[in-house]
Each structure stands twice: as structure tokens, then as C-alpha cells.
Image (cartoon, rainbow, N blue to C red):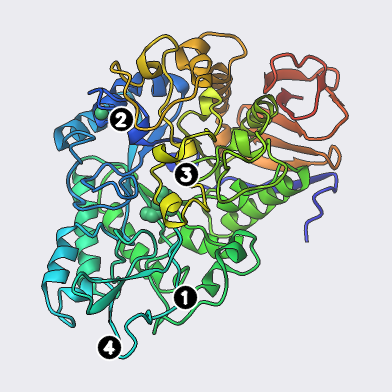
């Protein structure tokens, strides 16, 4: 066991190769909520293209765009009805081509979001399956089981949908059940069927041919189910608390899933230009997750264990240690991510007394924005110095909080409906981005329409209010990313430094020299040593002391 409080611990040495994805900063665009060029209240691809100069100026290397395919939008596009086209609400294939080529001209790469675990029930594959007989090759594309005429309410097993309620629904004729680990409009594909596997290889090629630089793969750990689909005897909370390893569930992290990604990597590698893929795999413990990023599988996997850390020095430090230990063992870069479209924004999360994995309810005690912003800025300051690849979620660079007071009628996440409001859902982190304070929908479009209502606070947080303003969160991110780039911190070597129990501190060494990163979570200030030069600070008022909930980068 490594003692995190011994004086210094060399923790991470960079890989011998430095492909772009090993140290990239990748920005997640949630297309519904980013920028709405046609004014219908839902963001679109042309909107994204119009903001590429903003993203370039921010200093990121790539963007990952959440699903933009034709979809009934039962799960905000994660219910795909055609993998090789664009939903008219987002634009057209020509708009996608324009987005990709503009991004490339600006030196930005683009990841698409691939959803292989399930399709929409409106996908022609599912429609074709329903039109065919039980037991037919068409039905074998999905997971159908006969209804027992003697016991017609008895489902094939006890699995629950991740969005609440049972994971099995009946076909319209009532003769069979089909499995859906999410909404009933998201039937699970049968990945034991070679035709399904072949179809996805074609989908990968379709997008790679169009110039896509890689894929974020949705619920990558879920494709293979244990033989016989046995009952599961734990709860969702058992995973979230880490009480059981993920593979204890017969529908997650099953060993054979890895074969699929090996075949995908062969396709990616047959294209020029270092195409890459990142796994969305909520898999614990760390060593199991690392199996997804072995040299012949994914390039990266989201580091969700770290994302779930409470605001405590010990937990953050241990997360850093475990992440490098497990990823370095397989030669993969660690990723660092604090927010995405599925979790409570980290600004709000870090202001809470405890984690609330199911979201925040309007009647929960309101988290303090000032505390949250202070901690979020400190967290990101630390995170952007960590070697490896970093993921940002749209709006975190503006200091956006979770929106917790959305009215029930505005909520669209199927989780809210399927749990009858018991789980509040994820709409609060999906509210459209404010670009301009004094404009309709804060500049999201010019009609004032917005698929989710924006709170008044978004006005003062709009990008135009922060651009060029010293000390703004946007300028902090720009400054951090500029130093990260100029010193190639993402490719650095990392040594943990002991400055006390309540402080997370490490040195990052690159060809440009060493910087010391200090994040203070304790009550007492940490005096900056004489002779140290301040390169960046999460709090613009730092001069000779690093106060509580503050992070700095120093040269020493
Ligand atoms: C992933 C997505 C989430 C979606 C789910 C089902 O977890 O990130 O938004 O609801 O998969 O596709
Ligand atoms: Mg639109």
C-alpha cells in the first residue's frame, strides 16, 4: 500500500508515445443545449459550428458531441432510430460535414457518440423484429422472451431499468417480453448475434469515412449479459456506493464484452490519423475499468470513480493514486472528468454536505453558489494540471450550477416519469447555455425559445459577461488551458507531495521544468514559500497564502 502522506511519491511517468488523445482536453457538447441557430428552442449542428471559434479560443483540443442521430428523443437522442443520419431537429448530414471540416480547419477534432447497447423502438431493426414471428432471425437482433401463458405477468427475470421500473415490457401483441435496460423505448440489442456486430462495424466506418476522429461509446460495459440472464440480487445503490464490483450484475462488465472493442479498434486503426474511442463504463473497481483501456481496446475510459469523490483531500488524493496505478499498469492515459450530462454539475455537487446520485430536488436545501463556485474553480484548477486527458462539460467554464428549481411540467428526463418523480432526473445539468446577457434566451438563439427554462442567474454568467473580464471563470479556464498547453502538462510526470492531510499537492514535471500544484481543503491557509512564482490561481486574490478551497500552480 502506498502511504499518501509520505514525503513525496513518484506516481506517474508518461507513456513512451504521445498520441494526441493521451493528453487531450475534450469538451462535451450536449447539442440540444449548446447553441440554437434556427431558433426552435433546441440547439443544432449549425449552432455548434458557429461556436467553434469560442471553443478554439477556450483552448480545447477536441469536442465530443452527444447523439445527433434521428431519434424520437425519448431519452434526449440516446434512443437512436438511424445511426447513419442526422435528426432534422439538429440539421442534416451536410451540416455535420460542415461542422467536422470547420473544426478540422481550426485544429479541433470531433468525437461522435455511439449508442450500441440499445436502439429506439422506432428503429427499422426493431420494427422488422416486431413484424416477424417469435423465434425468427429478425427477433434475434434483440432480447425477446416468451410470455408464459400460465403466468402472463411473470417477467423473464427481476432486472430493473436504470431509469426505474422493470426492465422488461411486452410486445404490442402481448406474446413476448423484450429487454430494455433503460426506457421501454430503448430495446436492448442482442450482441451475441453476429449480424448486430457486423452492422456496428459498418456504422463505425460510415462516420470514420466522414472524417469523425473517434467515438464516445455509450454504456460500453453493458453490451454482454451473463448466460441465461439470471436474477440480480443487489440494488442500484450497491453499485453507486461501491459495495459490490460492477461485474456482480449479470448485465454489466461481463468478460466477453472486450472482444467487441478489439474488433472495433481494428476498424479505427485501418484509418489514418490516430482515431480514438472513449468508454462510458461505470465500472468499479479501478482495475476492472483498466481492462477496457488495454492496448487493443479503448484509448480512454471516463474516470467516474474520481468524479464521485466527495470534497475531501483524502478521497481526492486516493483517487489520483488509484487512477494512475491502474491505468499506468496497462499503458493507458488516465482521464479526468467532473461533470457531464448525467450527473449533478460539480459546482453544485461540491457545495453539498453529501453526494446525491439521483439528483437534487427543488425541496432539498439550496446549495450555496459562492461555496460551490469557489470549490469548482479550485477543483478544475487542480484537474487541468493532472497528466492525462481532461474532459470538460459545456458551461462548466462559465461556472454554471445545476438548475434545481425546474417545474415538474418542464422536466423531460424519462427517469423523472418512470420513477414518478422519486428520482428527479438529469434535466438540471442540461439547461441551455447562456451566451449573451441582454439577448433572448441569453443568446442561446434569437427567438427566446428554450426547451428547458433558463434561470435568471444565467444572465450574469453569460459568456459575454465573462469574456475579457479579469478573474472570471471563463478567463480562468482559458489561462489554465494556455499554461497546460505551453508547458505540455498533460504529458508530464507526476509526483505526489505531502504538505499535510487537508492539502492535495503534486509536482508535474515536463521539459519546461516542474510546477507544484497545491489544493487546500483545510481551514488553515498554506503560506506560499518565498521565491515561488504564481503561475495560476483559482482565486484571483491569492498573493501569499492559499486559503481554504483554493488551488494554485507554482514554479518552485
Ligand atoms: C448513458 C448516457 C445517458 C443515457 C444512457 C442510456 O449513460 O450517458 O445519458 O440516458 O446511457 O443511453
Ligand atoms: Mg434548433
In the displayed structure, would residue 262 be above or below residue 342? Answer: below
Residue occupying image coordinates x 41% and y 65%: 222
In primary-sequence order, the first of circles 1 and 3 is 1
Expressed as whole percent of the image width and height from the top left, the position of residue 372 reads 66, 30
Gap between marks 3 and 4, in whole Å?
38 Å
Comparing labels 1 and 3, the label whose residue is closer to the camera: 3
Expressed as whole percent of the image width and height from the top left, the position of residue 146 reads 27, 83
**Horizontal arrangement in the rendering, residue 99 relative to residue 489 (left or right):** left
Comparing labels 3 and 4, the label whose residue is closer to the camera: 4
In primary-sequence order, the first of circles 4 and 2 is 2
Q: Could you tell me which secondary element the residue under label 3 belongs to?
A: loop
Expressed as whole percent of the image width and height from the top left, the position of residue 389 reads 51, 41
Q: Across the whole image, how many numbered discs are drawn on residues?
A: 4
Q: Could you tell me which secondary element the residue under label 2 belongs to?
A: loop
Which residue is tagged 2? 43
Front one among 440 and 117: 440
Residue count near mark 1 (Cα–Cα under 10 Å), binned few <14, some 14–19, many ≥20? many
In the displayed structure, would residue 54 be above or below residue 333? Answer: above
In primary-sequence order, the first of circles 1 and 2 is 2
Which residue is tagged 3? 426
Q: Could you tell me which secondary element the residue under label 1 belongs to?
A: loop
Residue occupying image coordinates x 16% and y 37%: 93
Comparing labels 3 and 2, the label whose residue is closer to the camera: 3
Gap between marks 4 and 2, in whole Å?
47 Å
Comparing labels 1 and 2, the label whose residue is closer to the camera: 2
Which residue is tagged 1? 250
Which residue is tagged 4? 149
In primary-sequence order, the first of circles 1 and 4 is 4
Residue occupying image coordinates x 52% and y 71%: 247
Gap between marks 1 and 3, in whole Å?
26 Å
Q: Is mark 2 within 8 Å of ligand 2?
A: yes
Amino acid at each position: 500500500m502506498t502511504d499518501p502522506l509520505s514525503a513525496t511519491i513518484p506516481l506517474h511517468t508518461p507513456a513512451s508515445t504521445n498520441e494526441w488523445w493521451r493528453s487531450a482536453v475534450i469538451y462535451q457538447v450536449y447539442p440540444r443545449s449548446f447553441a440554437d441557430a434556427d431558433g426552435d428552442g433546441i440547439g443544432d449542428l449549425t449552432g455548434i459550428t458557429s461556436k467553434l471559434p469560442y471553443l478554439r479560443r477556450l483552448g480545447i483540443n477536441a469536442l465530443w458531441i452527444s447523439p445527433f442521430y434521428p431519434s424520437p428523443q425519448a431519452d434526449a437522442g440516446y434512443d437512436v432510430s438511424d445511426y447513419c443520419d442526422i435528426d432534422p431537429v439538429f440539421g442534416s448530414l451536410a451540416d455535420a460535414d460542415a461542422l467536422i471540416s470547420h473544426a478540422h480547419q481550426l485544429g479541433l477534432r470531433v468525437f461522435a457518440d455511439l449508442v450500441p447497447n440499445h436502439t429506439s423502438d422506432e428503429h427499422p431493426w426493431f420494427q422488422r423484429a416486431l413484424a416477424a414471428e417469435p423465434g425468427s432471425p429478425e427477433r434475434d437482433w434483440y432480447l425477446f422472451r416468451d410470455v408464459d401463458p400460465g403466468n402472463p405477468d411473470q417477467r423473464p427475470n427481476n432486472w430493473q431499468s436504470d431509469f426505474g421500473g422493470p426492465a422488461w415490457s411486452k410486445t404490442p401483441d402481448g406474446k413476448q417480453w423484450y429487454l430494455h435496460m433503460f426506457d421501454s423505448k430503448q430495446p436492448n440489442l442482442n450482441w451475441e448475434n453476429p449480424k448486430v456486430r457486423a452492422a456496428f462495424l459498418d456504422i463505425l466506418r460510415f462516420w470514420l469515412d466522414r472524417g469523425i476522429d473517434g467515438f464516445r461509446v455509450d454504456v460500453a460495459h453493458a453490451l454482454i449479459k451473463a448466460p441465461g440472464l439470471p436474477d440480480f440480487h443487489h440494488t442500484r445503490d450497491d453499485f453507486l456506493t461501491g459495495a459490490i464490483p460492477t461485474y456482480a450484475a449479470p448485465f454489466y462488465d461481463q468478460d466477453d464484452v472486450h472482444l467487441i472493442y478489439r474488433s472495433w479498434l481494428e476498424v479505427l486503426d485501418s484509418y489514418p490519423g490516430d482515431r480514438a474511442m472513449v468508454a462510458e463504463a461505470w465500472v468499479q473497481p479501478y482495475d476492472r475499468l483498466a481492462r477496457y483501456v488495454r492496448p487493443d481496446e479503448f484509448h480512454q475510459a471516463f474516470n467516474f470513480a474520481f468524479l464521485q469523490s466527495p470534497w475531501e483531500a483524502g478521497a481526492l488524493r486516493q483517487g489520483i493514486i488509484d487512477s494512475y496505478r491502474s491505468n499506468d499498469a496497462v499503458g493507458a492515459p488516465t482521464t479526468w472528468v467532473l461533470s457531464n450530462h448525467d450527473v449533478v454539475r460539480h459546482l453544485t455537487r461540491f457545495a453539498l454536505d453529501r453526494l446525491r446520485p439521483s439528483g437534487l430536488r427543488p425541496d432539498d436545501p439550496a446549495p450555496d453558489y459562492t461555496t460551490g463556485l469557489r470549490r469548482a474553480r479550485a477543483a478544475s484548477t487542480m484537474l487541468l494540471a493532472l497528466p492525462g486527458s481532461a474532459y470538460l462539460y459545456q458551461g462548466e467554464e462559465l461556472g454554471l450550477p445545476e438548475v434545481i428549481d425546474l417545474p415538474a411540467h418542464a422536466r423531460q428526463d424519462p427517469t423523472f416519469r418512470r420513477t414518478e418523480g422519486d428520482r428527479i432526473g438529469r434535466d438540471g445539468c442540461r439547461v441551455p447555455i447562456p451566451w449573451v446577457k441582454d439577448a433572448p434566451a441569453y443568446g442561446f438563439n434569437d427567438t427566446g425559445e428554450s426547451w428547458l427554462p433558463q434561470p435568471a442567474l444565467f444572465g450574469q454568467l453569460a459568456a459575454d459577461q465573462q469574456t475579457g473580464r479579469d478573474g472570471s471563470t471563463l478567463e480562468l479556464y482559458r489561462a489554465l488551458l494556455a499554461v497546460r498547453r505551453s508547458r505540455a502538462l498533460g504529458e508530464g510526470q507526476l509526483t505526489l507531495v505531502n504538505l499535510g492531510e487537508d492539502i492535495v499537492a503534486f509536482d508535474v514535471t515536463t521539459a519546461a521544468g516542474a510546477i507544484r500544484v497545491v489544493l487546500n481543503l483545510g481551514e488553515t491557509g498554506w503560506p506560499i514559500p518565498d521565491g515561488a512564482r504564481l503561475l495560476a490561481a483559482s482565486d484571483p486574490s491569492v498573493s501569499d497564502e492559499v486559503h481554504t478551497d483554493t488551488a494554485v500552480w507554482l514554479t518552485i
